[in-house]
Image (cartoon, helix red, strand yellow):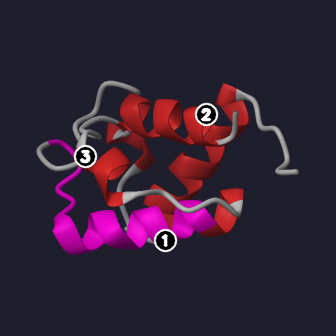
Amino acid sequence: MSKQYTREEIYTKLLEILVEDFEISKDIITPNANLFEDLELDSIDAVDLAVKLQTFTNKKITPENFKEIRTVDDVVNAVEELLK
């Protein structure tokens, strides 16, 4: 049984990962921020992010799920869905 997280906890963890691991300024991270255009992540970063989220959730994020993700809010939604 995986731990249940609130949207806020998921968002806070995602924020922490983006700031600490990807050195993105907290000021530009918003729910609507595009991971690739606004936050300047590349495909390698996206894979790293998926791995870090897998560690956080103890669930495997499929590449198909991750392909649809564009914004910070999309990541939160995907993680939330994964934990159901």
Q: Which residues are magenta?
A: 38-54
Mark 1 residue type: Val
Residue drawn where x is 59% and y is 42% of the image: 82
Q: Nearer the viewer, residue 37 or 5?
A: 5
Q: Residues within 10 Å of mark 3 (few under 14, many from 20)?
A: many
Quarter of the figure that contains the C terminus: top right
Residue drawn where x is 54% and y is 68% of the image: 52
Q: Please tell me which of labels 1 and 2 falls first in the chain.
A: 1
Mark 3 vs 2: CB contact within 8 A: no
Where is residue 13? Give x, y as percent.
63, 50
Residue tagged 1: 51
Could you give the CA–CA distance between mark 3 and mark 2, rounded to whole angstroms? 18 Å
Quarter of the rendering containing residue 41: bottom left
Where is residue 8? Give x, y as percent.
68, 29
Residue tagged 2: 80
Residue tagged 3: 35
Residue 68 shown in magenta? no
Mark 3 residue type: Leu
Residue 52 shown in magenta? yes
Q: Please tell me which of labels 3 and 2 falls first in the chain.
A: 3
Mark 1 vs 2: CB contact within 8 A: no
Q: Under tag 3, what secondary structure?
A: loop
Classify 77 as above or below 40: above
Where is residue 23? Give x, y as percent.
38, 67
Which SS does the magenta portion mostly show? helix
